[in-house]
Amino acid sequence: MNFIVWCSAECTVRVLDAAQRVGMLSERHSYIALSLDLHTQALADYSHGGANITGLRLFDPESPDVAAVVAEWALHYKEEAGEAATDVEELVAAPPTALLLAQLGASLAAQAWRRLNLPDIPADEDVRVGAFHADTLLNYLRSEEWESPAHGAVSWEADGGRRALQLQVVELARGGALQRAGQWAPGAGLTWHRAELPAAAPPPDSMVNRTFTVLIAENKPYVMKQESTLRLSGNERYEGFCIELIQRLAELLKFNYTFVEQNGSYGSRDNVTGKWDGMLGRLMEDQHIDFAITDLTMTAERERAVDFTTPFMNLGISILFRAPKQPEPKLFAFLHPFSNGVWLCLGFAYLGTSLLLYVVGRLCHEEWQNPYPCIDDPPALENQFTLANALWFNLGAILQQGSEIAPVAYGTRAVASVWWVFALVITSSYTANLATLLAKKSPNELIHSVNDLANNQLGIEYGAKAGGSTYTFFEHSENKLYRDMFEHMKQHKMPDSNPEGIQKVMTENYAFLMESTTIDYEIERNCQVIKVGSLLDSKGYGIAMKKNSTFRQALNLGLLNLQEAGTLREMQETWWKKKHGGGACKQVEDRESEKLSMMNFLGLFLVLVVGSALGLVLSCCDLAWGAVRRARLNGEPVHVRFWKELRFVFSFERSERPLQGSLGGSSRGSAGSARSAGSAASGAEETAGSAAADEEAEEAVRSLRTRSGSLASRRRSSMHAASVRRARHTAAHSHTPAPRR
């Protein structure tokens, strides 16, 4: 942003002071001050912000000619003013432009007066006598060219303006001095002379055009050896997050760098000697090392020895543990959508609603119906909602299969409707939860937090890198749990490096405590380990430098700029999840993984097999019970009757079963039985000698055939028992003797 300040020198200083208060004196701002007296003001406070402040002046107040003229003026002024001359020293140190112009005008007028040999005017003479020669004096001044020690060549235009006036262009330098940077003339315009100025020494905190030695330590993904088919040398041998961070800071702050690799530990303090070893020790002792960068944790103890920048990455301590194995599907996984309490309540609801439907059905007279539709005046009415039918009706509703039983009365319909709504919600909820639970695999995790690890009874050992910041955290922690964990770790040998700790996690029953960022990098590439629990603390990684380093502020500003631009987040995303095998353990939603194996339905098939076997056993028991009853009626042995019943069951070519008589007939056994029954009835009627009885028996037989066919087609399942009772009733009447005529 560019500004032009057109006011007095005092006003210009007030403008610069206000701009400094609101942060507008940075490298992005430029000011042009048009006051010719800018050199008379104190400008040192505005020379450190980086803003370009440019001014104009008629003369150089530090030149010897100007100094001589001002000194001569001061001498005469003191002689004339005497004790009233109190501010002469300030005017001599920074002479204003008006003073020099007044001296120039008086000097040139005196020279012209002497050249024209004009008479001297006494001090007590009338002013009009001097005005008499004014026009002559002015015309002479305009017609001549004059030389002044302080101003150089001086001449005027006809209208009185200065001819060929030259202005010096000055810029504010550090410290408050105005340095000449160019010259402006009416015809030639602006000419810069910056090259003639001596190069100023860079400020001590500036990193521009300087070369620094950066100490690094190899650790993925912060510092790594670059893999290449070419022969690499120098800084090109390394890559990683920290390497890219230094590159971006160098581009931003305009400095050069050289990497020096350090092997061994990052640094710890010897409590006896007080000296530091490792990377921090070399940084403190080697004068050629300027910075140190890697996954170097900022701690209070390290901060007392060296300086750190603001954290370029925030992290904490977490737990690295082996990945749990996926559990095998459970046998009765189809029961998991509902808890045991829900299943129990569903059973009670089913039985209770079935009993209620049974009672309501008996209360409603519309449910008592004629079991024989062909008989207008039946001997009795039957209710379709028996206890067995009520249970079957509710079971068919909740399994969404329905049944042949349909409620007629309003009461039974109300109960059935409520049960249907209940069954709809229950079935939908079960289906939704079943699909989710069968597809979801919940791993069997042994530990979930640091409390589980510290108090585990599974023989899981744990530890941290020996001498590292994580180990130090437990050593100096005031938390009782962490102190107990440190006492446990002291009794075992700790891994010397992070790779060694990771290897122990993969091969042993071991949990490794380390920085969360390193764990995040490892689990992106090693699918055998996972991160467990939340962070135990909060800390950060920073760039280390010698104590009281002058470059700390510049590096902090550079890191803040990278953070605000989102560069640090993008770099971490790149080095953690994209490069060098990152993303290998990312959970990919594959359609193949959605397929369910046979193990998911093994329990369901088991229920189907057991239920089918139970139905077969019950049917055999029913067959045996029927054989016992028929054997008693016919006077046959039970095993003989049962064998006949069983042979009939496996006679698959026969589709009709006779109501009476032997089961060994042909497929037309039903018709033959009917004819036999008709012949027997006719013989009985002839023996009785009654034609009316004969007609009544034949009518009974025909009625039996008609009712049997009708009931078989309309109500085979629910009215079979009624048909049997009706047949027995007809047979009883057919053997009743007819009245004699």
Image (spheres, rainbow, N blue to C red):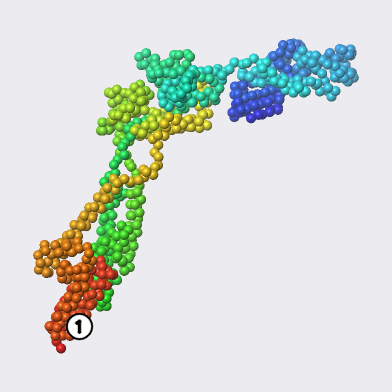
Q: Quadrant of the C terminus?
A: bottom left
Identify which residue is drawn at 32% across, 41% down: 442
Identify which residue is drawn at 23% across, 55% down: 612
What percent of the width, then of the height, locates residue 517?
Answer: 41, 30
Secondary structure under the numbered disc 1 in the rendered image:
helix
Looking at the rendering, which quadrant does residue 325 occupy? Answer: top left
Q: Quadrant of the N terminus?
A: top right
How crowded pointer 1 is (Cα within 10 Å; few <14, some 14-19, many 20+) is rated as some
Query: Which one is nearer the viewer's eye here, 681 or 464?
Result: 681
Vertical comparison of 366 with 603: above or below = below
Query: Can you name the residue that lies furthest to the bottom here?
Result: 741
Q: Is residue 63 visible?
A: yes
What percent of the width, then of the height, locates residue 699?
Answer: 22, 80
Identify which residue is drawn at 22% across, 64% down: 653
Query: Which one is nearer the viewer's eye here, 32 or 680?
Result: 680
User: Pointer 1: what residue?
Assistant: 695
What percent of the width, then of the height, locates residue 91?
Answer: 70, 16
What's the amino acid at mark 1? Glu
Identify which residue is drawn at 28% across, 30% down: 509
